[in-house]
Structures are given as C-alpha cells and as structure tokens.
Image: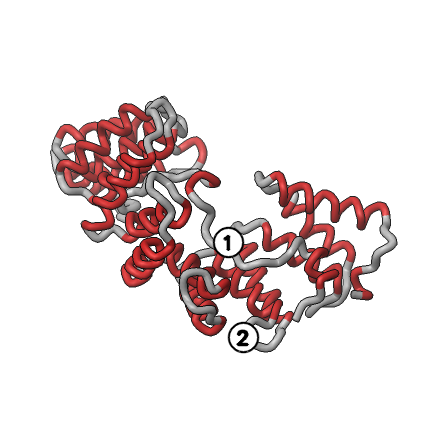
Amino acid sequence: MISKVLAVLLGVVALVGELPAQARQVAPVSAAKTAEDPDFSALLKRARAGDSSTYVDVAFHYLDAEDDKRDVDEASRWLSAGVAAGDPEAMVELGNLYFDGDGFPEDHRKALDLYRRAADLGNLDGIYNVGVVHEGGGGVKANLVEALRWYRRAADAGSEIGMFQVANAYQHGRGVRTDLGQAIHWLRKAVEAGSASAMNDLGALYSAGEGVPQDDVEALKLFTASARNGSAIAMANVAVVHHNGEGVPVDYVEAIRWYQLAADNGYLPAFYRLGAMCEAGEGIRYDQDVALGMYRRAAESDDPVLRQKARTAIDRLEHGDDEDPRAV
C-alpha cells in the first residue's frame, strides 16, 4: 500500500466520482448529428429546395467549421428554419445556442422556451435540457425541485443522462432529501442504459463501501467500463487502483499508463499525479524537468485547490526543498 508520506506528496490520491451538480457546470445535451456529408453543396441544395430534414446538418456544417469559416449566424438561420418546420432537433440545437451564448446572444429564457417546445414533441434531449435550465439559473430562477421533475421525466422515458442526474440528486440532496438507496437504484439503471458517469460513480461507492458492500473487484470492473466509454475521471480512478494496489498488486507502470490516458483526455489532476510519480521515481526514472512540465499543466486548472497544489510543487522543485520524494 502507498505510504502516508507519499499520499501527501500526491495530494492524497483518492478515488472520485463525478462532481455533484452544484460543483460543476451542468450543460445541455445535443440532439443533432454532426454533418458528415462530404458533398456539402448537394446537402445545401436539398436544404434550399425545402428539405427540412437537412436543416440541422447544414447548421452544424457552419458551427463545426474552423476559425473564420465558422458562421453562427448562418447556422442559427437554418436552425430557425427547422424550428419553423416543427423539427424538435432544431429546437434543441437553437436552444443550445441561446443557452451557451458562444458567438450568439445568451438568453436562457429563449433556450427554455425552445427546449419546452421540443419536450412537448417528445424529444428526450429537450425534456432533459428543460431540467438543466431550471438547475442552472442564468436568468431563470434556479429551482432544483423542478429540475429534478424534468430529469425524472427524461429518465422515465429512457434517457441515460436523465437517470444519472436523478441519481445525482438523491446522492447529494439536490431538490430532494438525500437517499443513498434511491441514488444506487438510479445509478444501476443508468449503468444498464450505458452511462459512463454512472459506471464511475457506482464504482466509487463500491470502492468506499457506501450503500453497497465494499468490493474492490466490482469497483475496478465499473471504473474500467466507464473508462472504456470515455470517462477521463474513471481513467484516473483505474490508475489509482493500480497505484494503491486496491484488490490488485501495486503496479506503477499500469498506473502511469492510465493517468496518462486521463491526462490526454483533459483531466488535469492526472498531470499532477504524473508529476508526483515522476518526482518520487515511481514506475519512471526521476526527472525534475518532466515533473515540472506535468505540474505546470496541472497549474492551468480552473480548480483553485489543484492549481495551488501544482504551484506549490513547482516552487518546491524550482527553489529546492529539504524533502526528497525519491527517499520516500
């Protein structure tokens, strides 16, 4: 097992679940497919001829274009045409433009109206996104009870992200009294529906023995499934399991591999942990420059706690310190 001294050096390596809603930005989901038609001119010709099934794809062609070719105004015109034609996907995507305000006037009330219209047509993403607006505020008074009602409606209709948010609400007391039993029930349903976030969170509960029997094997199974479905946090959790030797032999090389995967997928705490392993000479030759590079990437985080830990580590290496992590 990892020593207490090294655990401090690593910033107390611990298994983590997805952040509760109040600690992260809840974003609306997208209903549309990215346009992949190599012959855009043909797609545009169909749209101009009045084929409303192409409007969303045409809009995404403009939204996904690089740099100066990106044209949000043109995309919004095609999405507005889709809304006028009664297309719920166009309603969701135009709502997302209003919600995000990325090169477009931010207006959560207009986003809510569009999401509601899509929801009235039975669109799952529209139903879920109504919950997001009620939870996130932004010009619309936050109402966690109402948000949960819409998440539950999405969940009952088969939305995996809706199921996960219902579980999150019960686990963290968001719009309902905390109930770990209900949280686990909804996490299991979300796992069955394919939610990577739910796989990771249920794995964290098995690792801690919270609400379920403590089971390192089941935890690793769930973390690995979540990681293979793209969860960077789960990739880091697989690394922690191998780093700490939780139900498996300690394997620093395997831990580094999974931390690197997490880092490559944008999980900045993994850079800090890679820096600490490099500084301690675990599974990799001690290299101060490499460790500094990893800490500097971690210091780019928006998380003030992680940012401060990384800066402290950078200062230690740049100015010297009595404690040599290689001796741990």
Q: Quadrant of the rendered structure where residue 300 is?
A: top right
Element at label 2: loop
Q: Amino acid at mark 2?
A: Gly
Q: Do we see residue 299 in this rendering?
A: yes
Q: Which mark is residue 265?
A: 1
Say how the picture is coloured.
secondary structure
For the point 50% across and 62% down, the residue is: 208
* Residue 215 percent coordinates (x, y): 46, 71
295 on left or right of 267: right
Q: Nearer the viewer, residue 88 or 1?
A: 1
192 on left or right of 280: left
Q: Which mark is residue 247?
A: 2
Q: Nearer the viewer, residue 181 or 81?
A: 181
Q: Amino acid at mark 1?
A: Asn
How many angstroms separate mark 2 from mark 1 (CA)?
A: 26 Å
292 on left or right of 297: right
Q: Is residue 74 above or below residue 53?
A: above
**Around disc 1, counting alpha carbons within 10 Å, would you say few (fewer than 14), some (14 to 19), or many (20 or more)?**
some
Q: Nearer the viewer, residue 37 or 104?
A: 104
Q: Quadrant of the rendered structure where residue 243 is?
A: bottom right
Element at label 1: loop
Question: Counting residues from the N terminus, which is met first, the one under dot 2 or under dot 1?
Answer: 2
* Residue 288 percent coordinates (x, y): 78, 56
**Around disc 2, counting alpha carbons within 10 Å, would you say few (fewer than 14), some (14 to 19), or many (20 or more)?**
some
For the point 21% across and 39% down, the residue is: 89
